[in-house]
Amino acid sequence: MRWPERLLLVALLCCARVAIANDAYDELYRLYDYPQELNREQVPVCSQHGCERVTRVALSAAQWQQVGRHLAQPAASAAAEREQIREAIAEMERVAGLLAGTSGDRGGDLAGLTTLSAQMDCVDEASNTTTYLTLFEQAGLLHWHQVEPRVMRGYFIVGGWPHFTALLRERQSGDLWVVDSWFRDNGQPPDVVELATWKAGWKPEGFVF
């Protein structure tokens, strides 16, 4: 292992054990069967709709480094970091999916009717993505963004069907960006969209609920 990689591994192992210190994860801890202290050895993974099942998985040092490598090089801009985040979330889903038995999750809800034991709704996806982002933040891997509590759009009659997603705030500008993994199959990069655009009903082109 080269010296820079060794330093990265040490930083990941140390920082990933820091106790929770943000409102985003605190909300999840209060609502669901989540550990009070979040670290790579007890990562809660929601599934079966509305966090009905919470599986705590432990990432090995090698698995955590595999995820963290996407954010190891500090991004030159906020936009570049958002692209890194997309890849890191996708990697985290692949690793956690194997450990929690959720690799069969399909984008949307209807696409996964034949894999209900592994299927996630938007509440599951938003909660998991927020958890993963919090791990990255605790490890000092986010330089341009901070993790915010989940957001929702839609109120049945007004604004369509309720839909939850994870949220990031750009540190310098204060701009808000959703990180929505619900539209994609497990392990695919999530969609990162400006909050106002997402609130207006955004969905990927060609997506059918």
Image: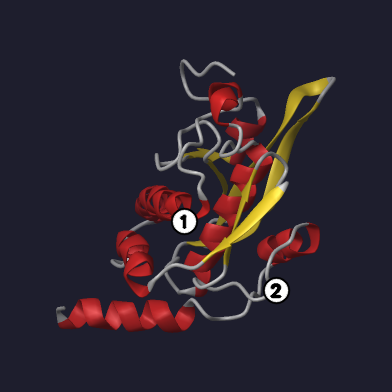
> Image point 73% across, 42% down: which residue?
50
Q: Nearer the viewer, residue 154 or 199?
A: 154
- Please give the residue where the numbered disc 2 appears in the rendered image: 36
Quarter placement of the C terminus: top right
Coloring applied to the structure = secondary structure
- Is 12 placed left or right of 134 in the picture? left
Instruction: Indicate the quadrant where residue 71 lies.
Output: bottom left
- Front position in the image: 111 or 73: 111
Q: Amino acid at mark 1?
A: Leu
Spot occupied by residue 149 in the image (x, y as percentages of width and height) = 69, 55
Q: Indicate which disc residue 99 carries.
A: 1
- Tell me the distance, in whole angstroms, between the alpha carbons under discs 1 and 2: 20 Å
Q: Nearer the viewer, mark 1 or mark 2?
A: 1
Residue pictured at 31% horizontal, 70% vertical: 62
Farthest-out residue, right? 157
Residue drawn at x 56%, y 39% is: 118
Q: In the figure, is residue 164 to the left or right of 73? A: right
Secondary structure of the residue carrying tag 1 is helix
7 versus 73 height, above or below: below
Q: Which quadrant of the structure image shows residue 180?
A: top right
Q: Quadrant of the N terminus?
A: bottom left
Residue 25 spot, x, y in % from top left: 67, 63
